[in-house]
């Protein structure tokens, strides 16, 4: 999983964004395309990729998000924070569906994202764009959960995850770095991911307890 701190802020003023939304709701595909081109990279970097942990799957999720937006844009009602919070919620729902359907190791479970959807919190402060603040919060929360979890598991497991998931080294490279065969590394990574998920879940429970 790659955590990217830099967040691109959309170039639109509130007035321009609202005008594009009005046109998109009326069926103007060019206007909708402009909105998706603006906010798509932020959705990918701060919402989908950190939670899905795989570039290909995150790209698929972004495409699915675009498809749902096209289907539902007519139902969107403009609010002061703009369209980004609505896009973010759609992306989270798409991520939940993909996590449920996948048959591979994942850092987060659907339940983790469902809690985010239920909270549905948006933040605005002064003149800062809502999408930038929300994206930064997403990235910070994802990295904090990951680092807290890694600190609680066996160092060997943490190394396997850092090398394979965070640094995105190949399976063969990480196996060699750990001094094991490829098949043994698969077992180590499986156990490491299981331990990490448990650690993340435990941390979340501790935070929620009064």
Image (cartoon, rainbow, N blue to C red):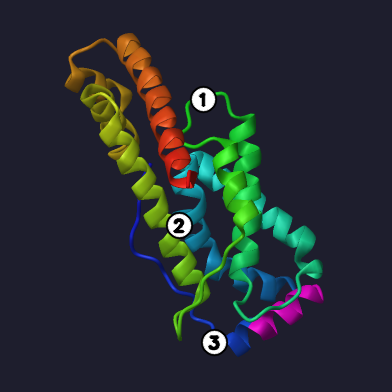
Separation of marks 3 and 2 at Cα, in angstroms: 23 Å
- Is residue 24 shown in magenta? yes
In this view, the residue in front, 57 or 107, is 107
In this view, the residue in front, 121 or 176, is 121
Q: Give the left or right position of residue 170, taking residue 179 as reference.
A: right
Check disc 3 and report the residue beneath it: 13
Check disc 1 and report the residue beneath it: 104
Secondary structure beneath dot 3 equals loop
Q: Residue at point 54% right, 82% down?
A: 12
Task: Give the residues in magenta.
Answer: 18-27
Secondary structure beneath dot 1 equals loop
Q: x%, y% of residue 41? A: 49, 61
Separation of marks 2 and 1 at Cα, in angstroms: 23 Å
Return the disc, 2 or 1, that comes first in the chain's sequence. 1
Residue 138 badge: 2
Q: Give the left or right position of residue 50, taking residue 66 as reference.
A: left
Q: Residue at point 74% right, 74% down?
A: 24
Q: x%, y% of residue 7? A: 39, 66
- Is residue 148 shown in magenta? no
Q: Residue at point 30% right, 35% down?
A: 150
Return the disc, 3 or 2, that comes first in the chain's sequence. 3
């Amino acid at each position: 999983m790659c955590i990217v701190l830099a967040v691109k802020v959309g170039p639109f003023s509130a007035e321009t964004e609202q005008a594009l939304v009005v046109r998109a709701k009326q069926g103007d595909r060019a206007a909708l395309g402009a909105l998706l081109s603006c906010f798509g990279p932020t959705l990918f970097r701060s919402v989908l990729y950190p939670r899905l942990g795989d570039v290909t799957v995150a790209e698929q999720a972004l495409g699915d998000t675009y498809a749902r937006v096209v289907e539902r844009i007519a139902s969107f009602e403009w609010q002061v924070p703009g369209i980004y919070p609505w896009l973010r919620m759609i992306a989270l729902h798409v991520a939940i569906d993909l996590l449920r359907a996948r048959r591979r190791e994942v850092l987060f479970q659907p339940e983790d994202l469902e809690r985010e959807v239920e909270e549905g919190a948006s933040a605005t402060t002064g003149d800062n764009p809502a999408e930038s603040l929300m994206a930064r919060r997403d990235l910070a929360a994802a990295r904090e959960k990951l680092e807290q979890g890694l600190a609680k598991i066996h160092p060997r497991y943490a190394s396997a995850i850092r090398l394979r998931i965070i640094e995105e080294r190949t399976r063969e490279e990480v196996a060699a770095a750990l001094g094991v065969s490829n098949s043994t590394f698969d077992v180590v990574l499986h156990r490491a991911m299981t331990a990490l998920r448990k650690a993340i879940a435990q941390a979340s429970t501790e935070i929620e307890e009064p």
